[in-house]
């Protein structure tokens, strides 16, 4: 989940985001890897993203895909 929030933070441009107040991660997979739902709430606007995760013995790869409104 931390990696998912970090990916959202970097995707947004690292501009004054609070990991608790501005970001929400849901649909967290119960197995290694998979897809989560991310929401970025800022200035009264909520954007939704698909967050994908791939777990390997040596690393965790996380990437974000914007869901058009």
Image: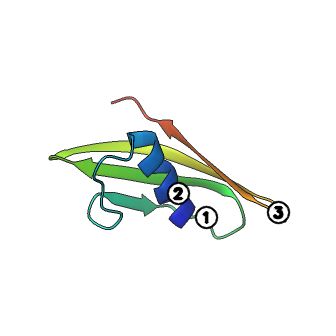
Please provide percent x and percent y for residue 34: 66, 55
56 w.r.t. 9: above or below: below
First in sequence, mark 2 or 1: give its number.
Answer: 2
- Furthest toward the left, the residue is 44
Instruction: Find the distance from the CA under tag 2 to the CA under tag 1.
Output: 12 Å
**What element does badge 1 sit on?**
loop
- Please identify, in this view, whether the residue under mark 2 or under mark 1 is nearer the observer: 2
Q: Can residue 1 be seen in this view?
A: no
**What element does badge 2 sit on?**
helix
Q: How crowded is mark 3: few (under 14 residues within 10 Å), some or many (20 or more)?
A: few
For residue 29, the mark is 1
Q: Are marks 2 and 3 in contact (CB under 8 Å)?
A: no
Q: Mark 2 points at which residue?
A: 4
Q: How crowded is mark 2: few (under 14 residues within 10 Å), some or many (20 or more)?
A: many
- Left or right side of 3 for 5: left
Determine the residue positioned at 27% across, 52% down.
16
**What element does badge 3 sit on?**
loop
Q: Is residue 7 visible?
A: yes
Please provide percent x and percent y for residue 47: 32, 42
Instruction: Find the distance from the CA under tag 2 to the CA under tag 3.
Output: 17 Å
Q: Mark 3 points at which residue?
A: 58
Please provide percent x and percent y for residue 18: 30, 61
Determine the residue positioned at 42% across, 50% down.
9
Determine the residue positioned at 38% across, 47% down.
14
């Amino acid at each position: 989940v931390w990696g998912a929030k970090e990916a959202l933070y970097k995707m947004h441009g690292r501009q004054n985001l609070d990991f608790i107040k501005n970001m929400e991660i849901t649909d967290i997979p119960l197995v290694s890897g998979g897809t989560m739902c991310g929401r970025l709430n800022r200035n009264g606007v909520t954007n939704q993203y698909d967050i994908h995760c791939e777990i390997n013995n040596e690393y965790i790869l996380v990437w974000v895909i914007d869901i058009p409104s």
